[in-house]
Amino acid sequence: MTRSLTVLLALVALAMFPAALDEAKAMPHTPAARPPVAAPIPTTTSASPPATAPSGPTTIAVVGDSILMQSWQQVHGSLSSGGYVPEMVARPASGLAFTAFFDWDAELRRLDAAVRPDQLVVQLGTNDLGYPGFYESGAAVGFVMRTTSARRVVWVLPSADPGRPDRQPNMERIRVALQDQASDGPYADRLDVVDFGRSVAAVPGTMEADLVHVTPYGAQLLADLVRAGVDASP
């Protein structure tokens, strides 16, 4: 099942945030504490019980690197406003291919056991620049799918880095590999992608000077894409 969702919500992002750019290095090294999630409001009972029990809030797990850390408030807010319960983990400079830096295998398994998410959003790949083969072989997607019970995974395609010739070829290989896996890989029935990379490339003011990290505009664009990808769940 393939749904490549490219949502260009630049006007909303530009209207909602000031023009000041936040430097990535100014971000805290640990995500801000999440506010407690309110318990679902009890439904009114009647003499005849409903045919099916009412479902509770839908939990969405979101994992990523420093780009998610920069966009923490926007992504959390966007999902919460849609009635979802976001459970987020962000680790700067981390990737899936080099697990000696941060053990995403252990973290994904811990997160899955703790919250049993309905969907998992993956914003990883930017720091795996040196390992495109890990994605082309299907190992990256298999790595994630084997560690989550989520019925659906939404992968945020990384930036294509059009202004960075030192990065662009390998990043494009990673992007294409993820698209191919979502199109006709062994986990295609559970995997969708949203094209953050193409979206930010098309909207001025969304990337910082390094063309890797995001401005507040880019953070809101990421949040809007994540929300759209989650909302598109069948």
Image: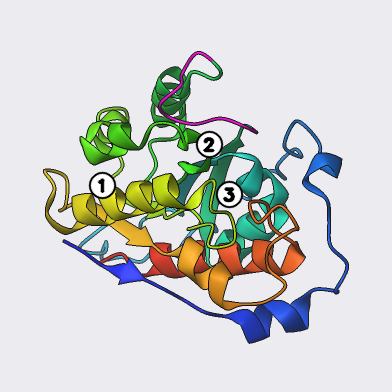
Q: Earlier in the sequence, mark 2 or mark 3?
A: 3
Helix, strand or loop under label 1 = loop
Number of numbered discs present? 3
Q: Earlier in the sequence, mark 3 or mark 1?
A: 3
Q: Residue 25, percent across and down?
A: 82, 40
Report whether residue 148 is seen.
no
Report the residue at 57% width, 80% height from top. Answer: 9
Q: Is residue 157 above or below residue 138?
A: below
Q: What type is the residue that disc 3 sits on? A: Ala
Indicate how the structure is coloured in the image. rainbow
Q: Residue 169, percent across and down?
A: 41, 50
Between the C-alphas of marks 2 and 3, the distance is 37 Å
Q: What type is the residue that disc 2 sits on? A: Asn
**Viewer-side residue, 126 vs 40:** 126
Quadrant into which the C terminus falls: bottom left
Compared across the picture, whether 201 is left or right of 55 comes to: right
Compared across the picture, whether 75 is left or right of 96 comes to: right
Q: Which residue is mark 3?
A: 39
Q: Residues within 10 Å of mark 2 (few under 14, many from 20)?
A: some
Report the residue at 41% width, 73% height from top. Answer: 6
Q: Is residue 95 above or below residue 198?
A: above
Helix, strand or loop under label 2 = helix
Between the C-alphas of marks 1 and 2, the distance is 26 Å
Q: Residues within 10 Å of mark 3 (few under 14, many from 20)?
A: few
**Viewer-side residue, 83 vs 17:** 17
Q: Which residue is mark 1?
A: 151
Magenta-highlighted residues: 92-100
**Viewer-side residue, 221 vs 169:** 169
Look at the numbered discs 1 and 2 and tell me whether their residues touch, using CB distance below 8 Å: no
Q: What type is the residue that disc 1 sits on? A: Arg
Between the C-alphas of marks 3 and 1, the distance is 23 Å
Q: Is 194 one of the magenta-colored residues?
A: no
